[in-house]
Image (cartoon, rainbow, N blue to C red):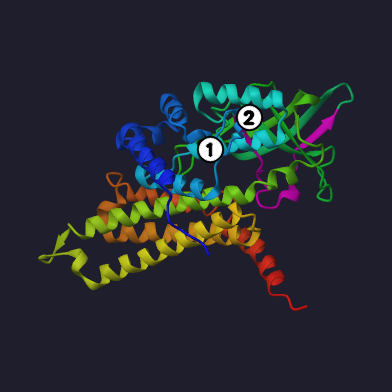
């Protein structure tokens, strides 16, 4: 039986997180970070030094042993407290990915950079203009030159942190861009390598993380830049997609919780027609349906995280959680904006920001539609009659 109670250790961690957010992540600073498309380095370092950024990184590299339920609790609370999309936790998960695929030497170098700045040391270049969810249509190619070097050519898009991360991790097809070619490899190299050109993209939400298109024009790197096995890069990357979906779902839940709290507080104070608007049944209905969604979101998320921690396959449940929670979060944030009326549609309120950020999560990390594709196949297998 699943126990959703929070342990004393988890509660202490969440309390420390709330204190960190109150001290370091003021609304004034958050608005500045959204404008400059980057969090101040001293705050990233403070988050890491507080211990949160070491979660899921292997202990041999200085990390802290953790579990998916704790990850979900921390990410949710981080977004709820700041009322914003804070990317700290993705930094730690990126280092976890690097420990899975990188050589000990590369992981050591990555950890040194991470501990120096508190920021993710590499950007992930996966999507392409004509190959987002359809990865087999990828056109970026790695050509082995036969002299110990490899040359990359292609275009990547929606690359988070490309402007600020010192390294770039690129997924490319081996030799042939043909759709039939399923051999892809992972490469990691400095972002300032000759032949790389960045073109910033400007999102309408989640602006706190910079976003770019990346052009690779005869980018020549040593063969030692290969991560993991040649031709097995995409399969390697997929290994951690399910954990990433738990983190992304936690992010959406945190935004929804923040929006619900803002709307309920406003409804209890705003007076219209001689009464607080929270006394009107229509507003109560909105808040009731929002609360139902938030509780359903949290239950599905914690169930999925618990399954992950107990070795239960979550390919279905992680896709269900990613789809439902990101969609429901947008709906909750939209209703919060409706309850607050015109003021909710201004930059003076955080609710508009919450709605924009929540809406972006219906694309990032796998679209709503792709989650249906993943879930549908698993559901058919689940209920198949022998």
User: Which of the two discs, 1 and 2, sits closer to the camera?
Assistant: 2
The stretch of residues the image draws in magenta is: 122-144
Q: What separation in Å lies between label 1 and label 2 (alpha carbons)?
A: 13 Å
- The number of numbered badges drawn on the structure is 2
**Residue that extends furthest to the left in the rendered view of this protein:** 274
Other residues around mark 1 within 10 Å, as few (<14) / some (14–19) / many (≥20)? many
From the viewer's side, name the closer residue of 218 and 79: 79
Q: Can you tell which mark lies on residue 220? A: none
Residue of label 1:
55
For numbered disc 2, what is the local secondary structure?
A: helix
Image coordinates of residue 212 in percent, x first then y, are: 57, 35
Image coordinates of residue 147 in percent, x first then y, are: 88, 21
Residue of label 2:
60
| Quadrant in the rendering for residue 62 | top right
| Quadrant in the rendering for residue 82 | top left
Q: Is residue 51 above or below residue 334?
A: above
Image coordinates of residue 195 in percent, x first then y, are: 70, 24
């Amino acid at each position: 039986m699943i126990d959703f109670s929070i342990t004393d250790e988890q509660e202490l961690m969440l309390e420390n997180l709330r204190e960190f957010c109150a001290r370091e992540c003021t609304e004034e600073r958050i608005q500045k970070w959204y404008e400059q498309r980057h969090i101040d380095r001293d705050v990233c370092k403070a988050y890491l030094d507080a211990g949160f950024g070491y979660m899921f990184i292997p202990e041999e590299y200085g990390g802290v042993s953790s579990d998916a339920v704790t990850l979900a609790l921390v990410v949710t609370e981080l977004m709820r407290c700041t009322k914003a999309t804070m990317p700290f936790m993705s930094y730690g998960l990126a280092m976890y990915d690097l420990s899975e695929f990188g050589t000990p030497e590369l992981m050591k170098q990555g950890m040194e950079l991470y501990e120096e700045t508190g920021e993710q040391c590499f950007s992930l270049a996966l999507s392409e203009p004509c190959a987002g969810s359809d990865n087999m249509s990828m056109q970026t190619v790695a050509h082995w030159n036969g002299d110990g070097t490899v040359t990359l050519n292609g275009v990547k898009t929606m690359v988070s942190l490309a402007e600020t991360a010192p390294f770039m991790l690129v997924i490319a097809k081996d030799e042939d861009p043909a759709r039939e070619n399923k051999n892809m490899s992972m490469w990691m190299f400095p972002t300032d390598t000759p032949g790389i050109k960045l073109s910033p993209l400007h999102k309408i939400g989640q602006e706190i993380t910079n976003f770019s298109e990346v052009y690779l024009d005869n980018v020549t790197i040593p063969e030692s830049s290969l991560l993991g096995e040649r031709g097995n890069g995409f399969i390697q990357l997929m290994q951690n997609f399910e954990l990433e979906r738990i983190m992304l779902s936690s992010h959406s839940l945190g935004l929804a919780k923040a929006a619900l709290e803002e709307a309920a507080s406003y409804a209890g104070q705003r007076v219209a027609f001689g009464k607080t608007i929270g006394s009107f049944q229509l507003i109560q209905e909105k808040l009731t349906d929002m609360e139902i969604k938030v509780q359903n979101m949290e239950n599905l998320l914690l169930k999925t995280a618990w399954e992950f921690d107990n070795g239960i396959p979550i390919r279905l449940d992680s896709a269900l959680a990613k789809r439902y929670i990101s969609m429901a979060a947008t709906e909750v944030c939209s209703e919060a904006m409706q309850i607050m009326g015109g003021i909710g549609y201004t930059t003076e309120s955080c609710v508009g920001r919450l709605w924009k950020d929540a809406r972006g999560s219906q694309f990032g990390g796998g679209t709503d539609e792709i989650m249906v594709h993943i879930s549908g196949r698993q559901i058919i297998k689940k209920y198949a009659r022998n």
